[in-house]
Image (cartoon, rainbow, N blue to C red):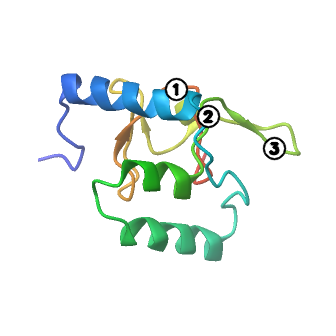
Amino acid sequence: MSDEPMPNSAEDSRLRQEIGELLHAGLTTEVEPRAYEFELIQRIVAELQDLPRSDLRGKLVKAGFTAEPYRGDEGIEEACETCMYYLSQRRFCQLPELMLPVEPNWSCRLWRI
């Protein structure tokens, strides 16, 4: 049995649309500082774990979601589609603290190669 979340394409599509609407409506998220150091990663993950599972807005804010790829000082583009947590066939973030349907060109500050 796989640890991959069971797909529910209708629910994923609805939730992905809701997230997109929040991001495009100007939801202010904690885009920086980026979580490159272990201590910051752990702090953000702990903050996400403290949120109720149903707190979509809180997850988006704490994880620093954006509706476009993040471009850092070194010119590296950080998009969901290049993150190790991204399931491309499902367009889904499998980071346990998020577990959200996402678009390939979105980004969050927990992005990892």
Q: Of the residues shown, which amino acid type is indicated by label 1? A: Pro
Neighbour class for label 2 at 10 Å: few (<14), some, many (≥20)?
Answer: many
The picture places residue 10, in percent across and down from the top left corner, at 20, 22
Q: Which of marks 3 and 1 is nearer the N terminus?
A: 3
Mark 1 lies on residue:
104
Classify residue 99 as left or right of residue 29.
left
The quadrant of the rendering that contains the C terminus is top right
Disc sitting over residue 72 in the figure: 3
The picture places residue 109, in percent across and down from the top left corner, at 62, 52
Residue drawn at (87%, 44%) of the image: 74
Q: Quadrant of residue 106?
A: top right
The picture places residue 23, in percent across and down from the top left corner, at 55, 34
Disc sitting over residue 40 in the figure: none
Q: Is mark 2 on a helix, strand or loop?
A: loop
Q: In which quarter of the image is residue 36?
A: bottom right
Classify residue 105 as left or right of residue 6.
right
Residue drawn at (39%, 24%) of the image: 17
Mark 2 lies on residue:
79
Neighbour class for label 1 at 10 Å: few (<14), some, many (≥20)?
Answer: many
Q: Of the residues shown, which amino acid type is indicated by label 3? A: Gly
